[in-house]
């Protein structure tokens, strides 16, 4: 029987084995481990010389097909969300090509020839946009087609900058179906928000005046960003998206936040989603009528701050772009509210709220660093697996997912856990994806960061090959009128047999 319920039925994750231990990184750089461990996490991964965003994405999707025994012929939508693509023409079809070759190599049928293959880019939100597109696709399909969306990214920052300890790499694939096995997504109630923020976080591509590359590496691997301003943008945009979601749900903020069982948010580092959830809660109270403002006033009184000032501030719509034009990026658009948030974080109510809503999967996520578009799907996968393994019953419960992409845009997505979720959650294998992990030395880290090489300790030469994954076999170098493939990657599947 056809149903209009759509959502997520499975997750599969791939992480490269090259790990940077953040405590060791602090020893290399002189950073404070106590602060880094508390605010950021414990480690992050880096792609090896033979890996790219495309190889990680394809490996994650193949794992999804295996773990959930998906008939490749039913896959009619393969969406890729990323900000790390290196080809300005082809997108998800590159991943499809790898999958088709590997499936044939294993004696299986390839993905459907009638499969849509979009790539969607908007910073860290591309995967969520791709997920929504895949779910909408399912609502229009007349048969039993399924959709797969994979979020894959490489977060790389300049050595010595504030973002360096928040690097990461990985991919998370999601199986989307009607009558989903894990999470039902309420598409009609999703809250969207977007606003142009200029210099928040960008990766401009340099071009010469005649259209040729301005240098030998026209693509920026590392972003241009403004840390404090970026944090303000994150808080502002997610709060705006949540406000719209609550309007669509016709729910009061305080009641909703209390009733939702688990909250998952885009996670560039450990502390950011915690601050965002706290800020959004306060923002919701300011827009929650008399009852909400009364609760907010109690927190203001405890912090010795003016409730009227903070309510006015939280109900205003700051002009974030004007801060760029006026070169005032150090100025916070919510100064009094941030003072309140710092005090609110110390209160038992906040600790209970965050501890109760954001604990699932959070410990394992400390190992991932920032995987951009894959951060939110990874946290949901880790949380559902932990709930399943610890015997926590989530069936029928409300959960909230909040995606964010710098530049800026946010999505607030209300979900409900399926009644039969445990069987699908048991197949996620998120913990298994954390292994193997090979801790890099300082020399190896610098070599891999600076030139993408590991010298005499390259993974393929000196580590046991990981079967069931894709690697870059070679890169084309032909420039000829009859045949050109300069810069095009060719891939190889390392079969499990």
Image (cartoon, helix red, strand yellow):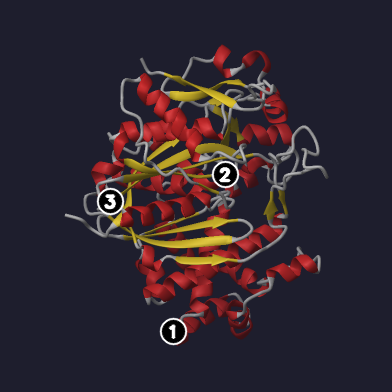
In which quadrant will I find the C terminus? top left
Contact flag, marks 1 and 3 (Cβ < 8 Å):
no
Residue depicted at 37% across the width and 77% down the height: 250
Quote the CA–CA distance across marks 1 and 2: 37 Å
Question: Residue 291, labelled with which disc?
Answer: 1
Pick the front one: 260 or 23: 260
Residue 398 percent across, percent down from the top left: 33, 62
Contact flag, marks 1 and 2 (Cβ < 8 Å):
no
Task: Check the image and report above or below for 205 versus 399.
Answer: above
Mark 2 vs mark 3: in front: 3
Mark 1 vs mark 3: in front: 3
Specify the quadrant of the image occupied by residue 422.
top left
- Lower sequence index among marks 1 and 2: 1
Q: Is residue 269 left or right of residue 249?
A: right
Q: Residue furthest left?
A: 1
Q: Which residue is mark 3?
A: 180
Pick the front one: 59 or 314: 59
Q: Which residue is mark 2?
A: 370
Q: Is residue 61 left or right of residue 163?
A: left
Residue depicted at 61% across the width and 83% down the height: 312
Is there any visible trace of residue 253 in the rendered image? Answer: no
């Amino acid at each position: 029987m056809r149903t209009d319920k759509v959502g997520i039925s499975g997750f599969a994750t791939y992480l490269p084995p090259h790990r940077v231990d953040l405590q060791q990184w602090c020893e290399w750089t002189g950073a404070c481990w106590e602060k880094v461990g508390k605010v950021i996490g414990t480690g992050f991964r880096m792609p090896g010389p033979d890996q790219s965003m495309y190889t990680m994405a394809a490996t994650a999707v193949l794992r999804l097909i295996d773990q959930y025994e998906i008939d490749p012929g039913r896959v009619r939508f393969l969406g890729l969300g990323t900000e790390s693509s290196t080809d300005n023409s082809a997108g998800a079809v590159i991943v499809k090509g790898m999958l088709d070759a590997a499936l044939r190599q294993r004696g299986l049928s390839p993905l459907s020839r009638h499969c849509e293959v979009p790539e969607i880019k908007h910073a860290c939100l591309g995967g969520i946009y791709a997920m929504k597109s895949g779910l909408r696709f399912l609502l229009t399909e007349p048969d039993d087609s399924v959709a797969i969306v994979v979020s894959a990214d490489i977060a790389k920052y300049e050595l010595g900058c504030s973002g360096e300890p928040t690097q990461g790499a990985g991919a998370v694939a999601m199986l989307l179906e009607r009558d989903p096995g894990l999470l039902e997504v309420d598409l009609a109630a999703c809250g969207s928000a977007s606003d142009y923020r200029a210099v928040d976080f960008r990766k401009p591509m340099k071009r010469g005046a005649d259209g040729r590359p301005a240098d030998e590496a026209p693509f920026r691997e590392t972003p241009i960003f403004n840390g404090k301003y970026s944090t303000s943008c994150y808080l502002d945009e997610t709060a705006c998206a949540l406000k719209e979601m609550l309007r669509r749900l016709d729910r009061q903020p305080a009641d909703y936040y209390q009733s939702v069982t688990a909250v998952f948010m885009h996670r560039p580092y450990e502390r950011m989603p915690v601050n965002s959830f706290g800020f959004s809660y306060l923002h919701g109270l300011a827009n929650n009528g008399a009852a909400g403002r009364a609760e907010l006033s109690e927190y203001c009184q405890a912090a010795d701050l003016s409730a009227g000032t903070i309510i006015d501030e939280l109900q205003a719509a700051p002009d974030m772009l004007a801060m760029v034009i006026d070169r005032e990026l150090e100025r916070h658009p919510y100064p009094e509210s941030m003072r309140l948030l710092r005090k609110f974080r110390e209160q038992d109510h906040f600790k209970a709220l965050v501890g109760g809503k954001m604990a699932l999967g959070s410990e394992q996520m400390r190992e991932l660093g920032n995987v951009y578009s894959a951060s939110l799907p990874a946290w949901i996968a880790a949380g559902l697996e932990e709930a399943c393994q610890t015997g926590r019953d989530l069936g029928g419960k409300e959960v909230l997912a909040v995606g964010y992409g710098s530049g800026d845009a946010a999505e607030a997505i209300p979900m409900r856990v399926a009644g039969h979720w445990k069987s699908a959650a048991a197949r996620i294998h998120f913990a298994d994806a954390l292994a193997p992990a090979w801790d890099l030395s300082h020399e190896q880290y610098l070599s891999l960061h600076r030139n993408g090489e590991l010298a005499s300790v390259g993974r393929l030469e000196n580590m046991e090959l990981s079967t069931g994954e894709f690697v870059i076999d070679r890169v084309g170098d032909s420039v000829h009128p009859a045949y050109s493939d300069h810069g095009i990657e060719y891939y190889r599947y390392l079969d499990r047999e």
